[in-house]
Image (cartoon, grey):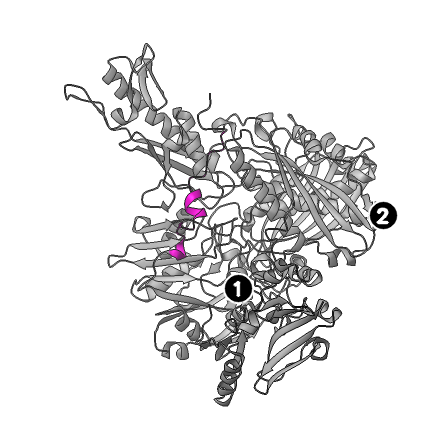
Amino acid sequence: MNTAVGKSVRRKDAWDKVTGKAQYTDDLPDAGILAARLLTSTCAHARINNIDVSGALGLSGVKAVLTGKDCPELLGPLLQDRPALAGDAVRYAGEPVALVVAIDNPTAENALRLIRIEYEPLPFVITPSQAMAEGAPLVHERVSEYKKVLADIYPEAGTNIASRYSMRKGNMEEAWKRCSAIVEQRFYLPPSDHLAMEIRTARAQISSDGDVLITASSQAPYSVRKQLAEAFSIPSGKIQVRVPFVGGGFGGKAPVMLEILAFLASRSVGGKAVRLTIPREQDMASAPCRMGLEAQIKVGADENGLIKAAELSFLLDCGAYTDISPYMTKAIAMDCTGPYHIENLSCEAICVYTNHTYATSFRGFSHESFTFCIERALDILARRCSVDPLEFRIRNAIRSGSKTPSRVECTASLTGDLKQCLNNIKELSGWDGGKAVPIKKNTVRAKGAACFWKTPNPPTDAISGAFITFNPDGSLNLQTGVVEMGSNGQTHLAQMLAEKLKIDADQVHVVIPVDTKTAPEHWKTVASMTEYMAGHAVMRAADDLLNQLRSNGAQALGCSPDDIEIAYSRVYSRKNPEQFIAFKDIAGGYKSNTGESVGEPVLGRGGFMLKGLSMLEPQTGHGRTGPDWTLGAQVVEVEADLKTSAYRVINASTVIDVGKVINPEAMRAMIAGGMAMGISLSSREGFAYDHDGIPKLPNLRTYKLMHIGQEPDYRVGFVETPETRSPYGVRGFSEHGIIGIPAAFGNALSAAFGKQLMTLPLTPETIWRTPAEDASDTV
Amino acid sequence: MIPFNFAYYRPDTLKEAADIFSELQSQGKSAVYYAGGSEIISMSRTGSVHPDALIDIKSIPECGLLTVDKERLHIGSACTLSRIRESNLFALLGLACGRIADHTNQCRITLGGNLCGSIIYRETSLPLLLSDADVSLYGPQGERRIPFRSVFNIRMRLKPGEMMVQIHVPR
């Protein structure tokens, strides 16, 4: 019988959050803390000829003004190409140029306005294809001289190419000959933003003996420690990073940015505590955003509707600095076809610098973008083959024995069961063939389908850990380095531990804030890997704990450790279960009736390092970046007004193979949240740029998100094909609700309006401007 | 963050409000009437406006009125969009109010702000034009009540220091 796994256990952070008592970084008291503010570039690309800070320094209350001269160090998790403050040149509008430290925020803000910068505008590039063109202006002149942090980053000298990944499989020439239908399409998707409800913020102070304390809204406290230590040659033991509650991350808080600036600010004022909270406008224009993407997709199928070949080219717009984008490019290559059996493949994924705000991981790690392109093309291909688009996907679904693009052989455990997901979503969504259905004059309804899959792309040696201690009442404390930013990871880990110990989940307390000095390192809270990586660490810590309890129990009960059973917060001998000792009496060691002490205090610990992953072979892409895949199917239904091009989303459905449902309600909510984000993204979000390459009005007055009240009905179904090497068989699921939604949404709207929609966001205006369907792209 | 200081006034009568405006004007200071504040706050954050003073009209009883008599529906300029919509007194206007921004903002944005602000849509104007509504205005030269259409042409054509007090919609 399950005690904890499979139950809708209430989130450990629920009460604090719903009552508003949860403390986020910027809620911490700020009495006596200095304030820092950023001045950012007004040019997309320019040389900085001079910065005059004398006016700002002269303002009463200003403590320090920093510019690029004060911080020559270059930063980056993969390729060190980014200064904390621009040096000789700015490479995007919004790039931090100067930092003012003052007694309070208004003083700092006023000081910013007294800084004079002389820019000499340089030619700029805004789209990846512009950046790839012959003779394009270079965003970085000496890209090949930057230090690589990881080996598989391949900048190309004299170009805007930051890295490139290829996949080659089968024989393309032969394959095209067998195709009776071929679809070729181009796509352009603009950058957009994460827009976590909590804006980015960081605090720093340096003690008299050089101990650095950073408090930040971050998904990656251990990366903050690592990057600070390396960039400024500080022993990492002298750096402490604390993360309280995080109000949403979505990948946008995985990069290290404000933490470095806050450190520099504190260092410039003798280590005094400094708080750097950027306004929403800078959170959008200056801090890293979601990548843009250009793609060219060519797919072909034979007369049976079986996909025979795919030739795919992706240009990822990484903006002015790489951050994690080369790995997002690699992730595109890894999963480029979607979850389909395709034997002949040629894929080129290139990470391209532009003069946009630099990009970073966004929920789904680039999958929502390339999935839009491939799934839109496949939908057209299915219709060309006169096959129901959902049936077409079932026919081509990846299965045991198929090879992934990087030639990993599929098993049920490795990828899960796509056919089951597709069959289940027929019923869940009321699938009707994906054709426009008239419901009244000028109004139709239509459904669109898409599949998704994703494997993580961590460093091959990423680690996690867990500590478990007992309280005197026999309950336990679980401590990990997992940041709780909404995905419920800590509660799921508590459930997994409780299940292992056969106790209720409310007997497990979690330590929600992360402190790098006390919590064991967890790589980053990204890539939906909490339940896998930290889950393994928790299982090992639980085994360690159980062994110690057995040892104590055997000594206290006078039997062999092999006879000891542990369940329901009790330790007992299998041979005599009536005689038992409660956790509270044995977890700290045991005292017999005569006062004799027996055993030792019980302290569980577990560590886990990823195993069996590889870098991709550069020419063919052969290799494996993640332990497993999570896949699923999604359907969106829209109601469209053919006269005005307006529409509304009626419902959105997901069936996902999660391996094992740990917490039905919480997992359902995460998937629904992903669908909501996907609908918002594909219906209204995107950065627009003016002729000078400046983002237009980056603020929430004009950049609209979907709001409560505008949401459709969300339907979620689970399939449970266990991942045999994962605790309880669970797969990553936190990001995945978003991945196929833009594609399903695009497919639904294309069917409804009878137009082939190839971009995002799909506003009524975009739809209206798109000409009615023609067949000219058929080869 | 609004990085500058400003004076905040909360008059209780129309006359007091207009007097404050005139007084500030004579001192060479810029003043704006303030109701919901969504526009003033967001534009002040970005530095597009920096008034020396805000004159909050929410304490002026006439501006907060929402009532029906035998002939007309009277709506104060400081009534929020959500209050107008939830009152169900004028269906088309309620529909317009319910489509502006989002629910949270509808609880802040006022009828006066939607009509007199700088954001171009002014969604509430159409129902008022269609219903031959009157508008009463108050400024340093006193009160006037005129057809809404005579003062609204793409935007409100108010005199300096004049504010919108009420809309009067025939039943």
Per the rendered image, the range of residues in magenta is A7-27
Q: Nearer the viewer, mark 2 or mark 1?
A: 1
Q: Position of residue A749 (x, y in %)?
A: 75, 48
Q: Position of residue A755 (x, y in %)?
A: 80, 50
What label sits on residue B54 in the rendered view? none
Looking at the rendered structure, whether the residues under marks 2 and 1 are on a common chain is answered as yes
Tell which subunit mark 1 falls on.
A
Of A361 and B48, the residue lying toward us: B48
Residue A13 lies in the magenta-colored region: yes
Asked which secondary structure carries label 1, the reply is helix
Of A66 and B133, the residue lying toward us: B133
Tell which subunit mark 2 falls on.
A
Q: Is residue B109 left or right of residue A221?
A: right
Which residue is the site of mark 2?
A775
Q: Residue reaching furthest top?
A: A575
Q: Main secondary structure of the magenta part?
A: loop
